[in-house]
Image (cartoon, rainbow, N blue to C red):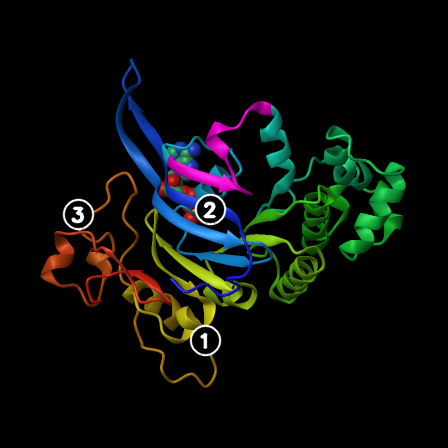
Amino acid sequence: MKNIMSDKPNILEVKDLKTWFPIKRGVLARTVGNVRAVDGVTFSVKRGETLGLVGESGCGKTTLGRTLLGLEKIHSGEVILDGSSLSTLDRQTLQSMRQKLQIIFQDPLSALNPRMNILDIITEGLAQFNMLSDRRETVASRLMAEVGLSAKMMYRYPHEFSGGQRQRINIARAVSMKPEFIVCDEPVSALDVSVQAQIINLLLDLREKYGLAYLFISHDLSVVSHISQRVAVMYLGRIIEYGPTAAIIHNPKHPYTRALIAAVPVPGDRRRGKIVLSGNMPSPAHPPPGCHFHPRCPEVMTVCRKTFPQERDDGTQRVNCHLY
Ligand SMILES: Nc1ncnc2c1ncn2[C@@H]1O[C@H](COP(=O)(O)OP(=O)(O)O)[C@@H](O)[C@H]1O
Ligand SMILES: [Mg+2]
């Protein structure tokens, strides 16, 4: 696959990653199956790049993000951050990885300790890692300015802020650690539309200023396409299409991607098909045989019911679909 920004090194490489949750039954808690939340995912992110990860609720986006942070156990496959594999690290190296990799969650309030004021929240990580370069107050006011908050508010508590301000606090806490990579898990999905753009612009500014790389997760393709250089489309634990944002938006190949795009209003774009998805995504505990998308696919063929499609790479886009 041709790489845009190909001069830059990878900050993150993910190879055939699987994260499964065992399903236990009976008094002996026997494992009777697995929820294959992430089921063989491969991608890379370059320094300073944003990869958008898009797909319906329940397709495995959060599990993937959490696995990258070491918050879920890897079933198989590999996560390589800045050249080191997450699974083989000793505790000390793991600590430095934790500093390089941060996460911003969807619900800004639940991510903040209600009993801590903003000063403590955004300097806690720095204090833990012995990274405070100055008085806590000085560091906090610098970080607050960075995310567009007045330093006067540093003694207030999370409930005294609006949703957008709380997400700014979460962002300040994440960037305080001088990370290289931030997993943004639906960071604007819980916010009013008018506030969403402000938070996205803040993330864009910080990316520019610090050369940050993001994995930007959203169920909303229009939000993802605004911030990402490349987009990965996820369905039932797998990436079914992957490529530069412009190619995904203007030349989507997978019928699922086309359906996602048809759902996004783009003024003046007449090439969009009118595909409406029927039914729900199946359970990742019992994926359908063949192509996982075939029960909902408007272009389903006989082969789709039997065989999972091999990946096709045309040099720009990767797609898993028997049409190609
Ligand atoms: N801790 C868990 N135990 C069992 N199943 C889980 C767990 N976390 C997530 N899942 C399941 O994994 C699938 C993917 O969930 P998730 O990663 O949250 O998707 P998304 O973020 O795309 O909405 C869902 O079917 C969900 O029910
Ligand atoms: Mg999620």
The reply to whether the C-beta atoms of the residues labelled 3 and 1 are less than 8 Å apart is: no
- Residue bounds of the magenta highlight: 77-91
Q: What element carries label 2?
A: strand
Question: On screen, 101 above or below 266?
Answer: above
Disc 3 versus disc 2: nearer the observer: 2
Identify the element where label 1 is drawn.
loop
> Which residue is rendered at x = 30% and y = 72% of the image?
275
Q: Which amino acid does label 3 sit on?
A: Pro
Kindly identify which residue carries mark 3. Answer: 289
Q: Which residue is drawn at 68% across and 61% down?
A: 208
View quadrant of ligand 1: top left
The answer to whether residue 45 is above or below residue 278 is above
Q: Mark 1 points at which residue?
A: 265
Q: Where is residue 7 in the image (x, y as percent from the top left)?
A: 54, 61
Placement of the N terminus among the 4 image quadrants: bottom left
Distance from disc 3 to disc 2, alpha carbons, whole Å, reads: 29 Å
State the residue position of label 2.
13
View extreme (front): residue: 7
- Residue 98, quarter of the rendered image: top right
Q: Is residue 264 visible?
A: yes
Q: What residue type is labelled 2?
A: Glu
Q: Are marks 3 and 2 in contact (CB under 8 Å)?
A: no
Mark 2 Cβ inside 8 Å of ligand 1: no
Instruction: Tell me the tag on residue 98.
Output: none
Looking at the image, which is closer to me, 291 or 213?
Answer: 213
Residue 136, percent from left and from top: 86, 37
